[in-house]
């Protein structure tokens, strides 16, 4: 099963939202020069105790009762290791969770990045009541955006309002897209 890295980003952000997070920090570093991709998602949700965190890395565990397996985290951990990288999950009850993965970009098994611009746009406009803080760092420069900053600029309009949506789409296309390979 090959999933692009944007799929993993969405999965990690959804986990954070499901854990009751208000702020979700999504950081992506994509560097051909350093031959690495680093993905970090840090949330201020309910967190996990040690036992739950260990189970979360087990492919046969999910707290979401409607299906039998939760594959998001184990799949990303497996992919990171397959690409000579690392995977880490740090969590504490009441304090939140940080999941980070590093992969060798040049590795044969490294999944494609996927459509980052579309993914960030989709996350920003669909996560009502969440502050998504996105940062990108690439060989051509850096980019950052947060839901709360856009909300402030949008003067009370929802981020899914057509005008805000099209503004955001154009903004990401002109500021983020050129930084991608
Ligand atoms: N950020 C998080 N905060 C709290 N619990 C989490 C977080 N991420 C994952 N978990 C726990 O780990 C389980 C496994 O996550 P995952 O592998 O993505 O599978 P799924 O989301 O399909 O259950 C979740 O069901 C949840 O209980
Ligand atoms: Mg998940």
Image (spheres, rainbow, N blue to C red):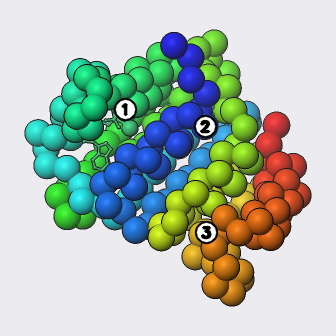
Residue at far bottom of view: 155
- Would you say 133 lies left or right of 138 here? left
Q: Residue at x 53, y 43 (%)?
A: 10
Q: Nearer the viewer, residue 123 or 55?
A: 123
Depicted 76 relative to depicted 11: above or below: above
Q: Quadrant of residue 17?
A: bottom left
Q: Residue at x 66, y 64 (%)?
A: 160
**In what element is the residue under mark 1?**
helix
- In percent of width and height, residue 92 lies at 20, 56
Q: Which residue is mark 1?
A: 73
Q: CA distance from mark 2 to mark 3?
A: 18 Å
Beta carbon of the mark 2 residue lies under 8 A of ligand 2: no
Residue 81 seen: no
Q: CA distance from mark 1 to mark 2?
A: 14 Å
Q: Nearer the viewer, residue 116 or 84?
A: 116
Work out which quarter of the rendered image holds the C terminus and state it. Answer: top right
Q: Nearer the viewer, residue 129 or 36?
A: 129
Depicted 138 relative to depicted 112: above or below: below
Depicted 93 relative to depicted 36: above or below: below
- In percent of width and height, residue 57 lies at 27, 30
Beta carbon of the mark 1 residue lies under 8 A of ligand 1: yes
Q: Which residue is mark 3?
A: 146
**In what element is the residue under mark 2?**
helix
Q: Residue at x 66, y 45 (%)?
A: 119
Quarter holding ligand 2: top left
Question: Reading the chain from its start, which is encountered first: label 1 or label 2?
Answer: 2
Which mark, residue 8?
A: none
Q: Are marks 2 and 3 in contact (CB under 8 Å)?
A: no
Q: Which residue is mark 2?
A: 6
């Amino acid at each position: 099963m090959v999933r692009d890295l944007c799929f993993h980003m969405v999965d990690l952000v959804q986990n954070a939202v499901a854990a009751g997070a208000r702020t979700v920090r999504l950081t992506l570093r994509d560097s051909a020069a350093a031959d690495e991709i680093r993905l970090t998602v840090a949330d201020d949700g309910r967190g996990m105790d040690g036992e739950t965190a260990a189970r979360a890395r087990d492919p046969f565990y999910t707290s979401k009762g409607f299906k039998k397996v939760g594959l998001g985290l184990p799949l990303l951990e497996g992919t990171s290791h397959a690409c000579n990288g690392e995977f880490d999950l740090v969590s504490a009850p009441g304090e939140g969770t940080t999941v980070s993965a590093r992969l060798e970009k040049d590795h044969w098994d490294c999944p494609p990045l996927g459509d980052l611009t579309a993914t960030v746009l989709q996350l920003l406009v669909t996560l009502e009541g969440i502050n998504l803080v996105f940062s990108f760092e690439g060989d051509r420069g850096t980019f950052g955006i947060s839901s709360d900053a856009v909300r402030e600029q949008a003067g009370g309009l929802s981020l899914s309002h057509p005008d805000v949506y099209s503004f955001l789409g154009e903004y990401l296309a002109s500021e983020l897209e050129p930084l991608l390979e």
